[in-house]
Image (cartoon, grey):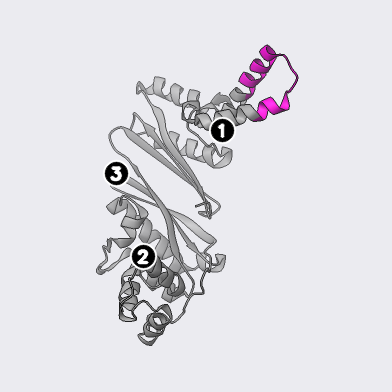
Amino acid sequence: MSVQITPTLIKKLRDRTGIGMTKCKEALETSNGDIEVAIANLRKAGMASAVKKEGRETNEGMIGTATSGDTVAIVEVNAETDFVVKNERFQEFLNAIAKEIAETTPASLDVFLQQKYSKDPSITIDDFRATIVQAIGENVQISRLQTFPKGSSHSVGVYSHLGGKIVTAVEIEGASDEEDLAKDIAMHIAAAAPEFVSPEEVPESVINHEKEIIKSQIKGKPEDIVEKIISGKINAYYDDVCLTRQKFIKDDSKTISSLVEDKAKATGKPMKIKRFIRWSVGQA
């Protein structure tokens, strides 16, 4: 009786061996779904010389960036130890993966892992990752990716901090030649760690949660006073977590919103911050 080779079973074998998903599927089909037999066969074939233990985590890593044409790519790759992350082979892999993402703009991480590697179309990106696992001897995983378009009306700024442990990026809509401004804001994001672009983006559920906390702190006060306190504290909350309301780290006489507005007036281009990310290793 044949066993169904499910994606979960394939992933389990991949986690233990570091072999690409395609090869794992083939090995499981040959072994009729028996993982231990599949591992033994892979080892005999010289493909799984370093079998990974179930649940071995990849908590260390680095975030890489690359630009190709009108696309900026950001990707996080993780390994088990910081020693391996500093390895030249690991960093070469990170840079190659970032460049591949910038050139191909995949729709998602899953799509990216299954697409063909441009420098060797006989293997997928996930197979390429598996070769690095075999070469380095540690589990290596691509955990997330993001692309930002550049072009006639977009400027993208990227800032890397602590050797790729924290990476930020911001997209400004309305101008294509404001990368210096965007990079300044990206640097600000690394330091100030905003959660939202503007108050309009804060979910109502988050605001209601903040209001409940405030109410619990001011019990017994008259209702009109309570409303004024809530309004003031919510505004202070916006100043703290919304990028456009934060004080610019290089000039605290300006908010990020006024910084962009001043540049828009000076250039005659209506600019606004469209989105940003602030990634730190392991956050995903």
Chain part drawn in magenta: 213-233
What whole-number distance in Å separates the C-alpha atoms at marks 2 and 1? 39 Å
Residue 281 appears anywhere in the view: yes
Give the vertical position of 110 relative to 213 (above or below).
below
Residue 100 appears anywhere in the view: no
What whole-number distance in Å separates the C-alpha atoms at marks 2 and 3? 35 Å
Find residue 147 and name its label: none
Residue 96 location, x and y as percent? 36, 61
Give the vertical position of 55 relative to 213 (above or below).
below
Which is nearer the eye, 243 or 57? 57
- The amino acid beneath tag 1 is Val
Most common secondary structure along the magenta stretch: helix
Give the vertical position of 263 relative to 4 (above or below).
above
Residue 180 location, x and y as percent? 43, 36
Question: Which residue ends up furthest to the bottom in the rendered image?
Answer: 44
Q: Is residue 40 left or right of residue 165?
A: left
Residue 229 in magenta stretch? yes
Q: Which residue is mark 3?
A: 70
Crowdedness near tag 2: few (<14), some (14–19) or many (≥20) residues, C-alpha within 10 Å:
few
What residue appears at the point 26 percent right and 62 percent down from the top-left corner? 118
What residue appears at the point 73 percent right and 23 percent down from the top-left corner? 219
Q: Which residue is mark 2?
A: 7
Residue 135 location, x and y as percent? 42, 75
Q: Which residue is mark 1?
A: 241
Marks 3 & 1, CB-CB < 8 Å contact: no
Marks 2 & 3, CB-CB < 8 Å contact: no
Marks 3, 1: nearer the viewer:
1
Q: Identify the element where label 1 is drawn.
A: helix
Q: Is residue 22 left or right of residue 245?
A: left
Marks 2, 1: nearer the viewer:
2
